[in-house]
Image: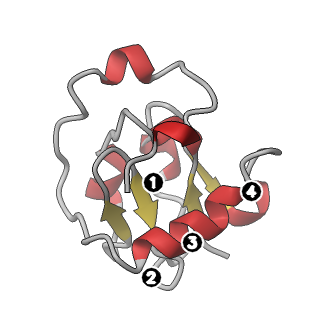
Amino acid sequence: MAYVVTDACIKCKYTDCVDVCPVDCFREGPNFLAIDPDECIDCTLCVPECPVEAIYAEDDVPAGQEVFVALNAELSRTWPAITQKKAPLPDHAQWAAVKEKLPHLER
């Protein structure tokens, strides 16, 4: 069972999770991070690091966000790996509490 980045990450892209990942399973897009399910070892280290609580175990993804399981798998096939923490997006603070951000996802 892999971990999944969900809606809360969109337009924020905090990368605190990247620094603690022992297998470099995070992939970086323009305004979102994805987890490669084939690389994730289910260590849980990334979960408490996310300031917007965007990371869940695949079986625990909140209702209505199940699409992110397939989306992480899809995007991780084409997006490059990210292995070091970066600054969040410039307007992250205004987006951190916004819900239902999927229409804002940039591929």
Q: Secondary structure at mark 2?
A: loop
Circle 3/circle 1 CB separation < 8 Å? no
Whether the residues at callouts 2 and 4 have beta carbons within 8 Å, the answer is no
Label 4 residue SS? loop
Q: CA distance from mark 3 to mark 4?
A: 18 Å
Residue pointed to by mark 4: 66
Residue type at numbered disc 3: Asp
What's under tag 4, amino acid-wise? Glu
The residue at the point 53 percent across, 36 percent down is 8
Dividing the image into 4 quarters, which one contains the C terminus? bottom left
At 36% from the left and 33% from the top, the residue drawn is 12
Residue type at tag 1 = Cys
Residue 18 at what x, y percent from top left? 30, 56
Which label lies toward us, 1 or 2? 2
Query: Relative to 91, does residue 61 appear above or below in the rendering?
Result: below
Location of the N terminus (image quadrant): bottom right
Q: Is residue 65 left or right of residue 28?
A: right
**Residue at 58 percent of width and 48 percent of height:** 6
Give the mark nearer the N terminus: 3 vs 4: 3
Q: Is residue 103 left or right of residue 9?
A: right
Residue 99, image x and y in percent? 61, 26
